[in-house]
Image (cartoon, grey):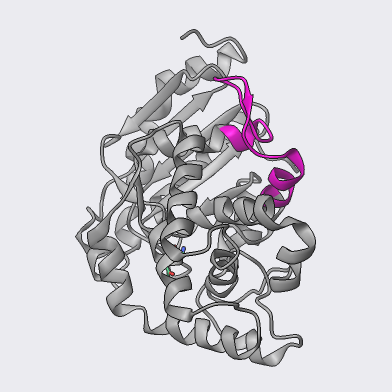
Amino acid sequence: MRHQQHPDIWQQLQTHLGEWVIQSKAQAPKGHVATYIPELANASEDSLSICVMDGSGATVTAGETDCLFTLQSISKVFTLMLALIDHGEAVVFSKVGMEPTGDDFNSMLKLELVEPGIPFNPLINAGAIAISSLIGGDTPEKQIERALAFFRDIADNPSLAINQAVFKSESDTAHRNRSLAYFLKDNGVLDGEVDDILRVYFSHCSIEVSCKDLARMALVLAYDGVDPIRNKRLIPRRYVQIAKTFMITCGMYNASGEFAMNVGLPAKSGVSGGILTIVPGRYGIGVVGPALNRKGNSTAGVHLLETLSREFDWSLF
Ligand code: DON
């Protein structure tokens, strides 16, 4: 497919992306792979890859782009939109707030400190667990099926699947998420059984993708819910607007301010090292570099996105 828009940027990406990836890889040793989900510790700590996709589906890639990784927290952006599709804004925002926390992604601090005891936003673990409970389906199996079908449609990839080893590894060790979920249950935020809701949550976190899948999913957000390749609306515009706003304010957790300052694009990270980013109206970008900084974001991935944003003046601000 031929790239039409901004041919200068495309050409520069083709020329320089490989060298920028090599430069950013130097940041990987400053971070470490996540080990609290034991299966994630098997990822290659020094790898970094990226796929940039334009509205025609043309891509520029660099790094180890055939490696697969699980979505982890990146899935939360999409389950939020699915919960909005299934229940609407009034119900969703009766269960989660709209504000960043400034705390770590798995913190339970504010659940007790601030009334009414609902998670501050849908992208921290507590908020995403509440959102998982709102995915349509009268059994956890049906909710998981519905979520998987939604991800497959957005990625335009019917083979997307749950990595069962990662699912089991998280499920066997998720003491903190269990505590958060029981706390939410006690606060009246969760309808249904904690174990069932967590099964849905661990399942969407364990969906396995490539960098290209991530860029393809990002592209739908970059075009406000329309897949520009199939020319088909997949998500209502208002729900993408909500998701993008959260990506700016909470997408990189308690480093969202710094990321907004240095990159200035809506993004969402996950503990497997993935980062989904968009250049609105232009590109979907998927990055993965498994070594994380203390706040749970890919050290090399953030550095690479800072480079791209600076080179192409992509900041929205
Ligand atoms: O619940 C967890 O801890 C993981 N399944 C997802 C956390 C995550 O990706 C946070 N991201 N930086």
In the image, what residue occupies the spot 56% across and 55% down?
79
For this view, does 301 lie left or right of residue 100?
left
- The spot of residue 9 in percent (x, y) is 56, 19
Q: Residue furthest right?
A: 90
For this view, does 87 lie left or right of residue 298?
right
Magenta residues span 220-244
Quadrant for ligand 1? bottom left
Q: Is residue 213 above or below residue 254?
A: above
Residue 160 lies in the magenta stretch: no
In the image, what residue occupies the spot 69% across and 59% down?
249
- The spot of residue 232 in percent (x, y) is 62, 24
Residue 226 lies in the magenta stretch: yes
Q: Quadrant of residue 84?
A: bottom right
Q: Quadrant of residue 218?
A: top right
- The spot of residue 189 in percent (x, y) is 65, 80
Q: How many marks?
A: 0
Q: Is residue 221 above or below residue 31?
A: above
Q: Quadrant of residue 298?
A: bottom left
Q: Residue furthest left?
A: 42
Regarding residue 302, the answer to whether it shows in the image is no
Frontmost residue, 290 versus 55:
55
Frontmost residue, 198 versus 141:
141
Q: Quadrant of the C terminus?
A: top right
Regarding residue 147, the answer to whether it shows in the image is yes
- The spot of residue 128 in percent (x, y) is 56, 66
In the image, what residue occupies the spot 59% across and 63% down?
123
